[in-house]
Amino acid sequence: MIKHLTLTPDDIREINVLVAGLAEHFDTPEDPTFMHNASIYAHSLPIRVRQILNDFRLTEANDETICLISGYPVDDQKIGPTPPNRELKNDTPRTLKEQMLLIMCGSLLGEPFGWATQQAGYIVNDILPVQGDEHRQVGSSSDEMLMWHTEEAFHPYRCDYLALMCLRNPNRGATMVASNQVVCQLTESQIRVLFEPRFVIRPDEVHVEAHKVTLPKDADKMVPKASLQHAHANIARMINEPEKTAVFSGDPTSPYMIVDSLYQQGTDEEAQAVFNILINTINEQLTEIILQPGDICFIDNYRNVHGRKSFKANYDGTDRWLKRINITRDIRKSRSRRLTSTSRIIF
Ligand SMILES: O=C(O)CCC(=O)C(=O)O
Ligand SMILES: [Fe+2]
Protein backbone atom coordinates (compact mmCIF):
# COMPACT_ATOMS: atom_id res chain seq x y z
CA MET A 1 0.00 0.00 0.00
CA ILE A 2 2.90 2.35 0.76
CA LYS A 3 5.46 3.74 -1.65
CA HIS A 4 8.34 4.65 0.64
CA LEU A 5 11.43 6.82 0.39
CA THR A 6 13.92 7.41 3.18
CA LEU A 7 15.91 10.60 2.75
CA THR A 8 19.68 10.20 2.67
CA PRO A 9 22.07 12.63 4.41
CA ASP A 10 22.73 14.18 0.97
CA ASP A 11 19.00 14.64 0.35
CA ILE A 12 18.62 16.31 3.74
CA ARG A 13 21.54 18.62 3.06
CA GLU A 14 20.02 19.67 -0.29
CA ILE A 15 16.66 20.30 1.34
CA ASN A 16 18.20 22.33 4.13
CA VAL A 17 20.12 24.56 1.73
CA LEU A 18 16.92 25.17 -0.22
CA VAL A 19 14.69 25.95 2.76
CA ALA A 20 17.34 28.10 4.45
CA GLY A 21 17.54 30.25 1.30
CA LEU A 22 13.76 30.56 1.09
CA ALA A 23 13.47 31.41 4.78
CA GLU A 24 15.51 34.53 4.08
CA HIS A 25 12.76 35.79 1.79
CA PHE A 26 9.55 34.52 3.33
CA ASP A 27 8.37 34.37 6.91
CA THR A 28 5.30 32.26 6.24
CA PRO A 29 4.44 29.61 3.67
CA GLU A 30 1.08 31.37 3.28
CA ASP A 31 2.89 34.28 1.56
CA PRO A 32 1.16 34.44 -1.85
CA THR A 33 4.52 34.80 -3.63
CA PHE A 34 5.87 31.70 -1.93
CA MET A 35 2.72 29.78 -2.76
CA HIS A 36 2.77 31.00 -6.34
CA ASN A 37 6.38 29.93 -6.88
CA ALA A 38 6.42 26.79 -4.74
CA SER A 39 6.26 24.51 -7.77
CA ILE A 40 9.36 26.25 -9.16
CA TYR A 41 11.25 26.10 -5.85
CA ALA A 42 10.34 22.40 -5.79
CA HIS A 43 12.53 21.92 -8.87
CA SER A 44 15.44 22.27 -6.46
CA LEU A 45 14.32 19.44 -4.17
CA PRO A 46 16.45 16.27 -4.36
CA ILE A 47 15.82 14.32 -7.56
CA ARG A 48 14.72 11.23 -5.58
CA VAL A 49 11.94 13.23 -3.93
CA ARG A 50 10.78 14.65 -7.26
CA GLN A 51 10.96 11.23 -8.86
CA ILE A 52 8.93 9.36 -6.24
CA LEU A 53 6.16 11.97 -6.16
CA ASN A 54 6.00 12.13 -9.95
CA ASP A 55 5.71 8.34 -10.13
CA PHE A 56 3.11 8.32 -7.38
CA ARG A 57 1.01 10.92 -9.20
CA LEU A 58 1.19 9.28 -12.62
CA THR A 59 1.35 5.54 -11.98
CA GLU A 60 -1.54 4.91 -9.57
CA ALA A 61 -0.23 1.41 -8.85
CA ASN A 62 -2.68 -0.71 -6.86
CA ASP A 63 -0.12 -1.39 -4.16
CA GLU A 64 0.97 2.25 -3.92
CA THR A 65 -1.97 4.35 -2.75
CA ILE A 66 0.09 6.20 -0.14
CA CYS A 67 3.51 7.80 -0.56
CA LEU A 68 5.67 8.21 2.52
CA ILE A 69 8.85 10.29 2.58
CA SER A 70 10.63 9.78 5.85
CA GLY A 71 13.85 10.81 7.54
CA TYR A 72 13.63 14.59 7.58
CA PRO A 73 15.09 15.57 10.96
CA VAL A 74 12.71 17.59 13.12
CA ASP A 75 14.33 19.36 16.07
CA ASP A 76 11.88 18.75 18.90
CA GLN A 77 13.26 21.66 20.93
CA LYS A 78 13.25 24.12 18.06
CA ILE A 79 9.64 23.58 16.95
CA GLY A 80 8.49 24.53 20.45
CA PRO A 81 5.40 23.30 22.26
CA THR A 82 2.41 21.80 20.48
CA PRO A 83 -0.05 24.74 20.27
CA PRO A 84 -3.25 24.59 22.33
CA ASN A 85 -5.49 25.25 19.32
CA ARG A 86 -5.49 25.38 15.54
CA GLU A 87 -6.04 29.09 15.03
CA LEU A 88 -3.10 30.52 16.96
CA LYS A 89 -0.54 29.89 14.20
CA ASN A 90 2.24 31.57 16.18
CA ASP A 91 4.55 28.57 15.71
CA THR A 92 5.37 29.57 12.13
CA PRO A 93 8.81 31.09 12.90
CA ARG A 94 9.71 27.74 14.52
CA THR A 95 8.16 25.39 11.94
CA LEU A 96 8.76 27.44 8.79
CA LYS A 97 11.23 24.95 7.28
CA GLU A 98 8.89 22.03 7.76
CA GLN A 99 5.89 23.93 6.41
CA MET A 100 7.81 25.09 3.32
CA LEU A 101 9.05 21.58 2.65
CA LEU A 102 5.50 20.25 2.93
CA ILE A 103 4.16 22.86 0.48
CA MET A 104 6.99 22.29 -2.03
CA CYS A 105 6.53 18.51 -1.98
CA GLY A 106 2.77 19.00 -2.31
CA SER A 107 3.34 21.26 -5.32
CA LEU A 108 4.84 18.30 -7.13
CA LEU A 109 1.43 16.60 -6.98
CA GLY A 110 -0.80 19.61 -7.73
CA GLU A 111 -1.94 22.86 -6.14
CA PRO A 112 -2.11 23.14 -2.35
CA PHE A 113 -5.31 24.89 -1.27
CA GLY A 114 -7.34 25.74 1.82
CA TRP A 115 -10.98 26.02 2.84
CA ALA A 116 -12.41 29.31 4.10
CA THR A 117 -14.49 27.08 6.37
CA GLN A 118 -11.54 25.36 8.01
CA GLN A 119 -8.84 26.72 10.31
CA ALA A 120 -9.52 30.35 9.36
CA GLY A 121 -8.65 29.80 5.72
CA TYR A 122 -5.02 28.81 6.30
CA ILE A 123 -3.54 26.51 3.68
CA VAL A 124 -1.24 24.75 6.13
CA ASN A 125 -3.47 23.25 8.82
CA ASP A 126 -2.59 21.98 12.27
CA ILE A 127 -3.71 18.57 13.43
CA LEU A 128 -3.42 18.50 17.19
CA PRO A 129 -5.67 17.64 20.14
CA VAL A 130 -7.77 20.53 21.48
CA GLN A 131 -9.12 20.57 25.00
CA GLY A 132 -12.88 20.13 24.95
CA ASP A 133 -12.89 18.31 21.58
CA GLU A 134 -11.89 14.92 23.07
CA HIS A 135 -15.07 13.16 21.98
CA ARG A 136 -16.02 15.06 18.84
CA GLN A 137 -15.70 13.66 15.31
CA VAL A 138 -13.07 16.23 14.31
CA GLY A 139 -9.32 16.09 13.72
CA SER A 140 -8.73 17.75 17.11
CA SER A 141 -10.33 14.90 19.07
CA SER A 142 -8.23 12.40 21.02
CA ASP A 143 -10.15 10.05 23.36
CA GLU A 144 -12.44 9.15 20.48
CA MET A 145 -11.49 7.29 17.34
CA LEU A 146 -11.81 9.60 14.31
CA MET A 147 -13.96 7.46 12.03
CA TRP A 148 -12.43 6.80 8.63
CA HIS A 149 -13.47 8.89 5.63
CA THR A 150 -12.61 10.26 2.24
CA GLU A 151 -11.45 13.79 3.02
CA GLU A 152 -14.36 16.23 2.40
CA ALA A 153 -16.32 13.37 0.87
CA PHE A 154 -19.43 15.54 0.59
CA HIS A 155 -17.72 18.27 -1.40
CA PRO A 156 -17.24 18.31 -5.19
CA TYR A 157 -13.92 20.16 -4.77
CA ARG A 158 -12.43 17.71 -2.29
CA CYS A 159 -8.66 17.23 -2.54
CA ASP A 160 -6.94 14.69 -4.75
CA TYR A 161 -4.27 14.22 -2.10
CA LEU A 162 -4.04 14.89 1.59
CA ALA A 163 -0.53 15.46 2.92
CA LEU A 164 0.33 15.00 6.59
CA MET A 165 3.71 15.99 7.98
CA CYS A 166 4.42 14.72 11.47
CA LEU A 167 6.18 17.10 13.86
CA ARG A 168 5.76 14.92 16.94
CA ASN A 169 3.85 11.82 17.94
CA PRO A 170 5.06 10.76 21.40
CA ASN A 171 2.17 8.42 22.23
CA ARG A 172 2.24 6.77 18.83
CA GLY A 173 -1.19 7.98 17.74
CA ALA A 174 -2.11 5.85 14.74
CA THR A 175 -3.49 7.05 11.41
CA MET A 176 -5.73 4.32 9.94
CA VAL A 177 -5.94 3.69 6.23
CA ALA A 178 -7.62 1.34 3.79
CA SER A 179 -7.11 1.34 0.03
CA ASN A 180 -9.44 0.80 -2.90
CA GLN A 181 -8.20 -2.79 -3.04
CA VAL A 182 -11.12 -3.58 -0.73
CA VAL A 183 -12.81 -4.03 -4.10
CA CYS A 184 -11.21 -7.50 -4.30
CA GLN A 185 -13.50 -8.62 -1.46
CA LEU A 186 -16.70 -7.53 -3.23
CA THR A 187 -18.87 -9.35 -5.79
CA GLU A 188 -19.44 -8.06 -9.30
CA SER A 189 -23.02 -7.10 -8.53
CA GLN A 190 -22.02 -5.26 -5.35
CA ILE A 191 -19.40 -3.33 -7.32
CA ARG A 192 -22.03 -2.46 -9.95
CA VAL A 193 -24.33 -0.97 -7.30
CA LEU A 194 -21.48 1.10 -5.87
CA PHE A 195 -20.86 2.56 -9.34
CA GLU A 196 -24.44 3.87 -9.47
CA PRO A 197 -25.59 7.30 -8.16
CA ARG A 198 -27.64 5.81 -5.34
CA PHE A 199 -25.90 7.39 -2.32
CA VAL A 200 -25.94 10.72 -0.51
CA ILE A 201 -23.38 12.38 1.79
CA ARG A 202 -24.15 15.28 4.08
CA PRO A 203 -21.52 17.85 5.14
CA ASP A 204 -19.76 17.16 8.43
CA GLU A 205 -20.15 19.40 11.46
CA VAL A 206 -16.97 21.39 10.90
CA HIS A 207 -18.12 22.74 7.55
CA VAL A 208 -21.69 23.32 8.61
CA GLU A 209 -20.70 25.36 11.66
CA ALA A 210 -18.06 27.32 9.84
CA HIS A 211 -20.25 28.17 6.88
CA LYS A 212 -22.56 30.05 9.20
CA VAL A 213 -19.89 32.55 10.22
CA THR A 214 -16.64 32.46 8.27
CA LEU A 215 -15.60 34.85 5.56
CA PRO A 216 -12.72 33.87 3.29
CA LYS A 217 -9.40 35.05 4.70
CA ASP A 218 -8.43 36.77 1.46
CA ALA A 219 -11.78 38.54 1.24
CA ASP A 220 -11.56 42.30 1.35
CA LYS A 221 -14.51 44.60 1.83
CA MET A 222 -15.46 43.94 -1.76
CA VAL A 223 -16.43 40.28 -1.33
CA PRO A 224 -19.32 39.92 -3.70
CA LYS A 225 -22.32 39.41 -1.47
CA ALA A 226 -23.90 37.24 -4.09
CA SER A 227 -20.95 34.81 -3.97
CA LEU A 228 -21.27 34.36 -0.24
CA GLN A 229 -24.99 33.90 -0.47
CA HIS A 230 -24.33 31.33 -3.16
CA ALA A 231 -21.89 29.48 -0.86
CA HIS A 232 -24.36 29.50 2.02
CA ALA A 233 -27.20 28.38 -0.22
CA ASN A 234 -24.99 25.59 -1.51
CA ILE A 235 -24.23 24.20 1.91
CA ALA A 236 -27.91 24.43 2.86
CA ARG A 237 -28.78 22.49 -0.29
CA MET A 238 -26.13 19.87 0.50
CA ILE A 239 -27.78 19.38 3.88
CA ASN A 240 -31.43 19.47 2.79
CA GLU A 241 -31.39 17.92 -0.67
CA PRO A 242 -27.99 16.27 -1.16
CA GLU A 243 -27.25 15.21 -4.69
CA LYS A 244 -27.16 11.49 -5.34
CA THR A 245 -23.66 10.29 -6.12
CA ALA A 246 -21.84 7.02 -6.73
CA VAL A 247 -19.33 5.56 -4.28
CA PHE A 248 -17.07 4.21 -7.02
CA SER A 249 -15.96 5.64 -10.35
CA GLY A 250 -13.27 4.89 -12.91
CA ASP A 251 -11.74 1.42 -13.19
CA PRO A 252 -13.83 -1.36 -11.57
CA THR A 253 -10.64 -3.22 -10.60
CA SER A 254 -9.08 -0.11 -9.04
CA PRO A 255 -11.95 2.29 -8.43
CA TYR A 256 -11.80 5.87 -7.25
CA MET A 257 -13.86 5.97 -4.07
CA ILE A 258 -15.88 8.53 -2.16
CA VAL A 259 -16.76 6.91 1.14
CA ASP A 260 -17.64 8.29 4.52
CA SER A 261 -18.39 5.86 7.30
CA LEU A 262 -20.52 8.38 9.22
CA TYR A 263 -22.18 10.81 6.84
CA GLN A 264 -23.06 8.68 3.80
CA GLN A 265 -26.12 6.54 3.14
CA GLY A 266 -27.74 4.49 0.39
CA THR A 267 -30.96 6.02 -0.94
CA ASP A 268 -32.70 2.66 -1.35
CA GLU A 269 -32.62 -0.63 0.48
CA GLU A 270 -30.27 -2.47 -1.87
CA ALA A 271 -27.84 0.46 -2.02
CA GLN A 272 -27.81 0.68 1.79
CA ALA A 273 -27.25 -3.09 2.14
CA VAL A 274 -24.29 -3.00 -0.26
CA PHE A 275 -22.96 0.11 1.47
CA ASN A 276 -23.05 -1.74 4.81
CA ILE A 277 -21.03 -4.56 3.26
CA LEU A 278 -18.49 -2.04 1.97
CA ILE A 279 -18.20 -0.44 5.42
CA ASN A 280 -17.61 -3.83 7.06
CA THR A 281 -15.07 -4.79 4.41
CA ILE A 282 -13.16 -1.54 4.89
CA ASN A 283 -13.26 -2.01 8.68
CA GLU A 284 -11.62 -5.41 8.21
CA GLN A 285 -8.94 -4.05 5.88
CA LEU A 286 -7.87 -1.00 7.92
CA THR A 287 -4.19 -0.82 8.68
CA GLU A 288 -2.24 1.52 10.92
CA ILE A 289 0.44 4.03 10.07
CA ILE A 290 2.20 5.50 13.06
CA LEU A 291 3.77 8.67 11.75
CA GLN A 292 7.20 9.57 13.10
CA PRO A 293 8.58 13.11 13.37
CA GLY A 294 9.72 14.21 9.91
CA ASP A 295 7.47 11.77 8.03
CA ILE A 296 5.59 13.34 5.14
CA CYS A 297 2.68 11.13 4.18
CA PHE A 298 0.72 11.69 0.96
CA ILE A 299 -2.63 9.95 0.93
CA ASP A 300 -4.35 9.55 -2.43
CA ASN A 301 -7.82 10.74 -1.46
CA TYR A 302 -9.37 9.02 -4.51
CA ARG A 303 -7.94 5.63 -3.62
CA ASN A 304 -7.80 5.58 0.19
CA VAL A 305 -9.89 6.31 3.18
CA HIS A 306 -8.21 7.43 6.38
CA GLY A 307 -9.04 8.00 10.03
CA ARG A 308 -7.24 8.05 13.36
CA LYS A 309 -7.27 5.83 16.42
CA SER A 310 -7.92 7.32 19.83
CA PHE A 311 -4.93 8.46 21.86
CA LYS A 312 -4.25 10.19 25.13
CA ALA A 313 -3.74 13.95 25.05
CA ASN A 314 -1.89 15.73 27.87
CA TYR A 315 -2.32 19.39 26.79
CA ASP A 316 1.13 20.21 28.10
CA GLY A 317 2.79 21.16 24.81
CA THR A 318 4.08 17.64 24.09
CA ASP A 319 1.04 16.24 22.27
CA ARG A 320 0.83 14.70 18.82
CA TRP A 321 1.20 17.43 16.18
CA LEU A 322 0.88 17.19 12.42
CA LYS A 323 0.83 19.80 9.68
CA ARG A 324 -1.70 19.09 6.92
CA ILE A 325 -2.38 20.38 3.43
CA ASN A 326 -5.00 19.61 0.80
CA ILE A 327 -3.81 19.29 -2.79
CA THR A 328 -5.87 19.41 -5.97
CA ARG A 329 -4.73 18.40 -9.43
CA ASP A 330 -7.10 20.95 -10.98
CA ILE A 331 -7.66 24.23 -9.14
CA ARG A 332 -9.76 25.57 -12.03
CA LYS A 333 -12.77 23.44 -11.22
CA SER A 334 -13.34 25.48 -8.03
CA ARG A 335 -13.01 28.88 -9.75
CA SER A 336 -16.60 29.92 -8.99
CA ARG A 337 -15.84 29.42 -5.29
CA ARG A 338 -12.54 31.34 -5.20
CA LEU A 339 -12.34 35.10 -5.29
CA THR A 340 -9.55 35.38 -7.86
CA SER A 341 -7.86 32.98 -10.26
CA THR A 342 -4.77 32.96 -8.02
CA SER A 343 -6.57 32.58 -4.69
CA ARG A 344 -6.22 29.14 -3.19
CA ILE A 345 -9.02 29.45 -0.68
CA ILE A 346 -12.32 27.78 -1.50
CA PHE A 347 -15.36 29.19 0.24
O1 LIG B 1 -4.74 12.64 12.59
C1 LIG B 1 -4.65 11.92 11.61
O2 LIG B 1 -3.79 11.04 11.50
C2 LIG B 1 -5.61 12.09 10.45
C3 LIG B 1 -6.56 13.19 10.69
C4 LIG B 1 -7.48 13.41 9.55
O3 LIG B 1 -8.41 12.71 9.29
C5 LIG B 1 -7.24 14.53 8.66
O4 LIG B 1 -6.28 15.25 8.87
O5 LIG B 1 -8.02 14.73 7.73
FE1 LIG C 1 -9.35 13.42 7.35
Image (cartoon, rainbow, N blue to C red):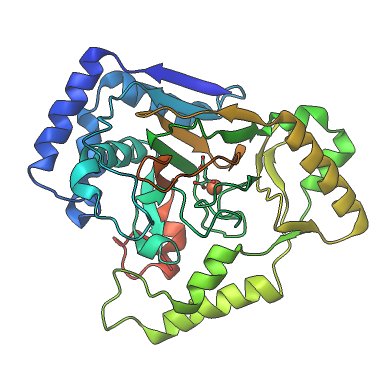
Residue plotted at (15% across, 50% down): 27
Decide if residue 273 is on the left or right side of residue 283: right
The residue sitting at the left extreme is 24
**Taking 228 as reference, is 267 left or right?**
right
Closest to the observer, 51 or 143: 143
Q: Nearer the viewer, residue 88 or 115?
A: 88
Residue furthest right as drawn: 269
Instruction: Name, please, the residue furthest toward the bottom.
Output: 225
Q: Residue 48, percent across and down? A: 32, 18
The quarter of the picture where the C terminus appears is bottom left
Tell me what residue is drawn at x 60 percent, y 57 percent: 136
Q: Quadrant of residue 176?
A: top right
Give 259 or 88, whichever is nearer the viewer.
88
Residue drawn where x is 49% and y is 44% of the image: 313
The location of residue 338, given as percent across then percent down, is: 38, 67
- The reply to whether residue 198 is visible in this rendering is no
Q: Quadrant of residue 323?
A: top left
- Above or below: residue 159 compared with residue 72: below
Q: Is residue 53 left or right of residue 65?
A: left
Q: Position of residue 325 (x, y in %)?
A: 40, 47
- Left of 240 or right of it: where is 217? left
The N terminus lies in quadrant:
top right
Q: Residue at x 77, y 27 (%)?
A: 184
Residue 96 placement (x, y as % from top left): 21, 43
Q: Check the image and report above or below for 212 versus 109.
A: below
